[in-house]
Amino acid sequence: MIFDRPLTAEERRASLRRIALFSLVNGVSYVCVGETIMVLAAVRLGCPDAVTAAIGTMLYVGFALLPLGRFLAARWGAAKSSAGAWVARNGFALLIAAALVWARGMPPLASAMVLVGAFGFYGCRAAAVVLQGPLYGEAATAEGRSRALGLFNALFYVGMAAGLAGVLAAMTRAEETAALVGIVCVGSAFGTWSSWFLGRAHESNALRDGARKPVRADLREVAANRAFRRHVAACCCLNLALMLVQPASVIILKRGYGATDLQAMLYTMPFIVGSGVGSWLTGPMGRRWGPRKEMLGGFLALLGICAFWALLPDGSVAGAGLAMAALWCGGYFALGFARSVVETAIMHYYLSAMEPRLRISAGIVLYTAMGVLAGLVGVALTALLMGRVSAGGATDVPGPRALAAYRTFFLEVLVLLAPLVVLVWRVIPLPEEVRARIRHHHAPR
């Protein structure tokens, strides 16, 4: 509901409860309809490698629909518009399930359905995400924002853990195609259900009125904000680090240490646990150190993870002992922890630095820079570095030669990313009065 006044304490609490439920249910959905399932479906349908690889880029191509979120918010407000985009997102996911049922044996049709489904899925997600940050900012006060954002992320990863358990059970008990169809349909249903909670969040008219203003004036004001400009530069560095480190951490386990698909999925559990723990702790960490130091700590942790994989000894998943398995679990736990801290700190700083009337326009700038600019650089660097390490068939067979190649990749990433710590360091601390509110020990009101 949209009010022509600031929200009361009770209205904020109601919004926090509804957004928390949205986060929990959406976590279950994402495991079932996200990129991993789309890739498995494309492989099952016999789509060309170029189509399968293109699915990973749709997360960034989809940012082309960011302005759609602003257009919708100007008419129906942030909550209803975000919920509507989320319903459409899950509708596009069903196109993947339809391809598995009706396009088997027809690679051209299957490829078209998969690509349209992936683009619609990520495009509608982008239109919704640019509105969700401002909506979260309305629900939580400055002193409770860090804790609220951490709680939302923690519940999302709890939902992911529950969803992953269901996915693993389905994949071990049903025929592959039937299992994928069922997983996507269940994920779409959970995603649509989650939108019901999101659409019932309260907001003031500041977001809708801000979305109705001419975008040029807002963008000029946002661009003139020196603190926000430095924040955008730091966020691009952080997103680039995540793009280079996280997928490669899965690849080295599978193609270097010889993990099967099921074993690789099982090792994502420590990642989800680390993400949940990191999200839960961002509240007290944010109040103690602030989002700027959280971003810096998360970036340094990602550099440490590069060194971890580069220095890890040889071995194989099949013959791994308890110590080696514990090291892998620790690495994925640290990766999940760092990712959740970085993601929460990025939104925390952005919501704290921008006035409510500018948050939608600022979100468009931030997510476009992170998604398109950093995304394209990340895709290019990944292709270049992976091409170098896999030259001559070095990574064709798991073993010492493949591990040496992937260690080279992580060392090169470490060298490339290390100088960027300066850009993260240069983020301007929030004003003292804002930091004082963040340090406040009370929960969100």
Image (spheres, rainbow, N blue to C red):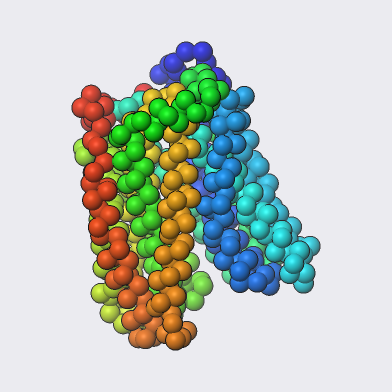
Query: Whole-percent x and y of residue 39?
Result: 59, 65
Query: Whole-percent x and y of residue 276?
Result: 38, 50
Residue situated furthest top in the rendering:
4
Res 396 seen here: yes
Which image quarter holds the N terminus?
top right
Seen at 67% across and 49% down, the residue is 92
Res 199 seen here: no
In-image side of 343 versus 1 (left or right): left
In-image side of 354 versus 18 (left or right): left
Q: Nearer the viewer, residue 16 or 310?
A: 310
Determine the image quadrant of residue 12: top left
* Figure check: 144 above or below 184: above
Which image quarter holds the C terminus?
top left
* Figure check: 398 above or below 82: below
Seen at 54% across and 46% down, the residue is 63
Please state the total of marks drawn on the protein image: 0
In-image side of 314 versus 217 (left or right): left
Q: Nearer the viewer, residue 280 or 343?
A: 343
Query: Whole-percent x and y of residue 103?
Result: 77, 65
Seen at 43% across and 58% down, the residue is 377
Q: Which of 152 and 166 is in front in this view?
A: 152
* Figure check: 147 above or below 266: above
Seen at 25% across and 60% down, the residue is 418
* Figure check: 241 above or below 432: below
Query: Whole-percent x and y of residue 179?
Result: 65, 64
Determine the image quadrant of residue 16: top left
